[in-house]
Image (cartoon, rainbow, N blue to C red):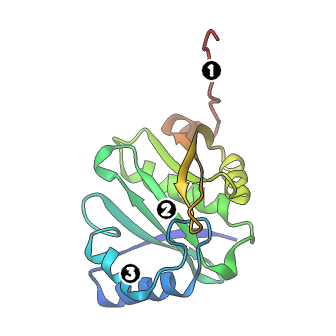
Amino acid sequence: MTVTLEPFAVSNPEDREALIDFMSQNAFPFHVGHRLTRSEIAAKIEQGDFDGDDHKTFWISEQRQGRIGVVVLSELTENVPLFDLRFSEAMRGQGLGVDALRAIANVVFETMPSVNRLEGQTREDNIPMRRTFHNAGWVKEAHYREAWPTENGEALASVAYAILRKDWESGTTTPVTWNEPW
């Protein structure tokens, strides 16, 4: 299956409505606010969470299935972008995550020449996403204990992964080495 990213603008009423539909019709159990209402999503759009200097949003499309998810790049003005990846409930577990991560890295590194690393985070209990990062050649760089709030009030660890431009260009993975004397 071929995964591509299609940019869109939430200032376009059709794109805005499609995003609200997608986000409100799917639950995202590994995200903060895993089930958002239409009004909550509209408020996030108005706050600039999907568009502007610091954010860019893309549909994730698959050749036969059409739109299967959404990815939001953020912190674009910091030159170390992060992303938020969300697949529709129907498309999870279909083996599309590695292709999606590669498509995200391609867009970032091909269109943002000043960016040298791209980062993503997930909850410690999101084992499928953690495997996806690993299988796509991303490196685990951090494990932030009790940093991710959950719906039940418990805080889980946030696990950070990144890919470097040089690894993306060469198709290799540079492992993290720890040289602490203790």
Relative to residue 19, is residue 5 depicted above or below? Answer: above
Measured as percent of width and height from the top left, residue 48 is found at 28, 69
Q: Residues within 10 Å of mark 1 (few under 14, many from 20)?
A: few
Between discs 3 and 2, the one toward the N terminus:
3
Report the front residue among 67 and 150.
150
Relative to residue 89, is residue 155 depicted above or below? Answer: above
Give me the residue at 61% from left, 79% from top.
Answer: 88
Between discs 2 and 1, the one toward the N terminus:
2
Give me the residue at 35% from left, 90% from top.
Answer: 14
User: In the rendered image, which quarter contains the C terminus?
Assistant: top right
Q: Residues within 10 Å of mark 3 (few under 14, many from 20)?
A: some
Left or right, 178 with reference to 108: right
Q: Is residue 128 visible?
A: yes
Which quadrant of the figure has residue 160? Answer: top right
Measured as percent of width and height from the top left, residue 20 is found at 42, 85
Query: Which element type, helix, strand or loop, lies under badge 1?
Result: loop
Q: Is residue 9 visible?
A: no
Between discs 1 and 3, the one toward the N terminus:
3
Where is mark 2, residue-wise? Answer: 84
Measured as percent of width and height from the top left, residue 15 is found at 37, 85
Report the front residue among 131 and 9.
131
Q: Amino acid at mark 2?
A: Asp
Where is mark 1, residue-wise? Answer: 178
Where is mark 3, residue-wise? Answer: 40
Measured as percent of width and height from the top left, residue 139 is found at 62, 39
Nearest-to-viewer mark from 1 and 3: 3
Left or right, 155 with reference to 7: right
Query: Which element type, helix, strand or loop, lies under badge 3?
Result: helix
